[in-house]
Amino acid sequence: MNKLSGIRFWVTLIMIASFTLAACASQPTPPTATVVPTVNTPTLTQAPMLNSSLVVPNTVTPVQAKPAATVTPPPEPTAVQPEPTAAAAQPNSASGSLLVLEWAGYEKPEFYKPFVDQHPNVKVDYSFMADDAESFAKALSNPDLDVMHPCANYYRLFVEKGLVQPIDTSRLKYWNSIYPDLAKIGNIDGKQYFIPWDWSYDGILVRTDKVKKIPQSWVDLWSPEFKGHETTIDAGEEAYEMTALSLAIDPYTATPDQDAQIKQKLIDLKPNLVNYWSDPTEVSNLMASGDLWVIGNAWNETYVNLIKEKTPVQYIMPKEKAIGYSCGYAISSKTKNVDLAYDFINARTDPQSEANMANDQGYGPSNKDAVALIDKDMVKLLSLDKPDLLTKIFFMKPLTEAQHQHFTDLWTEIKAAP
């Protein structure tokens, strides 16, 4: 997936109660597409502020020791120290820096405030990536990275190249609150390498005042009505999956003949396109101006931003299934800051941190305890209260190196075709 501004979608308590990725892997076709509410949705409220009780200062009144029954002086008083808990990180004297490979927009301190409070002398630096391919390239070339935040389709590549180390889940404060089905995606060959943090899906975003008929299907992207007013994502795997689903083909088991069919259909789409989008801010501005009427593989970030600007749009979940993804944190195999890396992941998966991310970005949290802290207007805006939502999502899978190369080569050919 691409994720330039960092951003992706999230989940309600009712919806995630029925969360099973096994169901997501099948491809039933609902009779109609799911339409997310339009601009008349209630106004988003400000994200909840961080709870100052998340950090307990290490200041306790000393307890006087009982004098011994001799003439010797009593022992010096000693301070009673509270035991650290999952919700109360103790400040320490660690210093230095932590380098995180991250999506732009996720560097906000409110998304990991417990770490800031726990390590006031540690500077968190970021190396930003624009898409999955860049995340992999930067991970390969930068041995100084401490923590990485790739998405599920690239998980196996990171493991096969030895870029990440297995995670000791006993060191994770919130491991028991992570949705198990999301956690399974980060388990490669029996070892936990990735801790999920955010998840979402691609849909179709439409200017309702510009089109005669609201698209309900991936197939509708090929409609002549949208010629010169449409864009789709500049990501080979997602474009391939979208097209495969439009043809009722499983993108991960396509035959050579089906592969050629998908390639040709993507070439046939080119006359409709203004461009291939990669910058969600740019594509949001183009839709707000009216130059774009339809965005294929749109992120919920763009939808949320346009709703805030009162642009008349609808976010459509195609009837063939939307394309879902999950992203998570991993610890570099080369890091010298293992303890800080664990503290950073614990701070990221703190319920309030995840709720702040969801309220700000509109992506789903991995910690189930964050759901109660998420703004209810956001839940309603994105229709996350629908219990069957995840049954309408086709989740991206970890790629082998051969699959990765195939999608890359095919996408280069498609973009170069006249």
Image (spheres, rainbow, N blue to C red):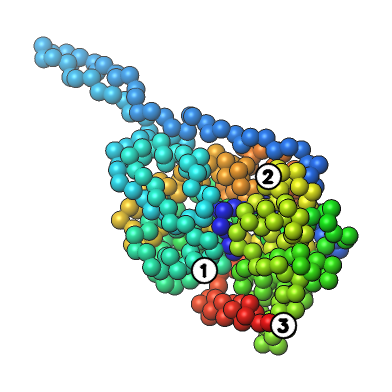
Residue 250 in the image: state x and y as whole percent: 70, 75
Which corner quadrant holds the N terminus? bottom right
Label 3, label 2: how far apart the Cα atoms are: 41 Å
For disc 3, the marked residue is: 264
Q: Residue furthest right?
A: 212
Q: What's the residue at 43%, 56% (across, down)?
A: 127
Do the numbered discs 1 and 2 sit on residues whose CB atoms are within 8 Å?
A: no
Mark closer to the chain start, 1 or 3:
1
Specify the label residue 13 is tagged with. Answer: 2
Q: Which mark is nearer the camera, 3 or 2?
A: 3
Placement of the C terminus among the 4 image quadrants? bottom right
Q: Are marks 1 and 3 in contact (CB under 8 Å)?
A: no
**Coordinates of residue 203 in the picture (x, y in percent):** 72, 60
- Give me the disc on residue 250: none
Estimate the spatial distance between the alpha carbons at disc 1 and disc 2, rounded to whole Å: 33 Å
SS for tag 3?
Answer: helix
Which SS class for mark 1?
helix
Image quarter of residue 403:
bottom right
Q: Which residue is mark 1?
A: 133
Report the mark closest to the observer, 1 or 2: 1
Taking 282 as reference, is 69 left or right? left
